[in-house]
Amino acid sequence: SQAVQGVHHCERCHTFTEAAVCATCLDVQRDVRQLCVVETPADQAALERTGSYRGRYHVLHGALAPLKGVGPAQLRLDNLESRLTNHGVTEVIIATSADVEGEATALYLAKRLAPMGVNMTRIATGIPMGGELEYLDDHTLSRAIAGRIRFG
């Protein structure tokens, strides 16, 4: 269809767009110092719905999954380093999923980007709003304890 033919990847962040550069990348109100790395355009859309993040994005279009044949070459990493060095990025927020592939991707990115000297953070994981401790699985509860933050 005509709609599918007009959609391609943004040349900066790789999300889906009809223009060469997407509206998010062109938005001058965005904080150019923050770059949030997500697995999919759907993940980006979910973050946008919260209204709590006002930086830029980098969409990988996948996560590392060696058993499925997905290695670093299959992810959209080609311009990530240049975006960090040429655009004033001071923080990379790694917002990959909290599953095996997402964790592997987060660790890979942390190791790959460490020499660039940029501050790297990982989105928090743990107890969902309204969650009762007695019903949570052990892994979620362990992550919540390990990732606790200062309070009060």
Image (cartoon, grey):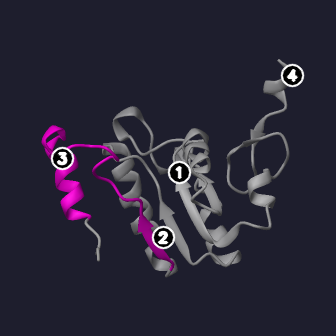
Q: Quadrant of residue 53?
A: bottom right
Is disc 3 surrounded by few (<14), some (14 to 19) or many (20+) residues within 10 Å? few
Q: Is residue 115 magenta?
A: no
Q: Considering only order in the chain, which callout, 3 or 2, is on the residue closer to the N terminus?
A: 2
Q: Amino acid at mark 4?
A: Gln
Cα separation between marks 1 and 3? 22 Å
Q: Residue at x 26, y 64 (%)?
A: 147
SS assignment at label 3 = helix
Q: Are marks 2 and 3 in contact (CB under 8 Å)?
A: no
Q: Can you identify the residue that label 4 sits on? A: 2
Q: Quadrant of residue 81?
A: bottom right
22 to 152, vertically: above or below: above
Q: Can you identify the residue that label 2 sits on? A: 113
Q: Which mark is residue 38?
A: 1
Eye-nearest disc, 2 or 3: 3
Is disc 4 surrounded by few (<14), some (14 to 19) or many (20+) residues within 10 Å? few
Span shown in magenta: 118-147
Residue furthest top in the image: 1
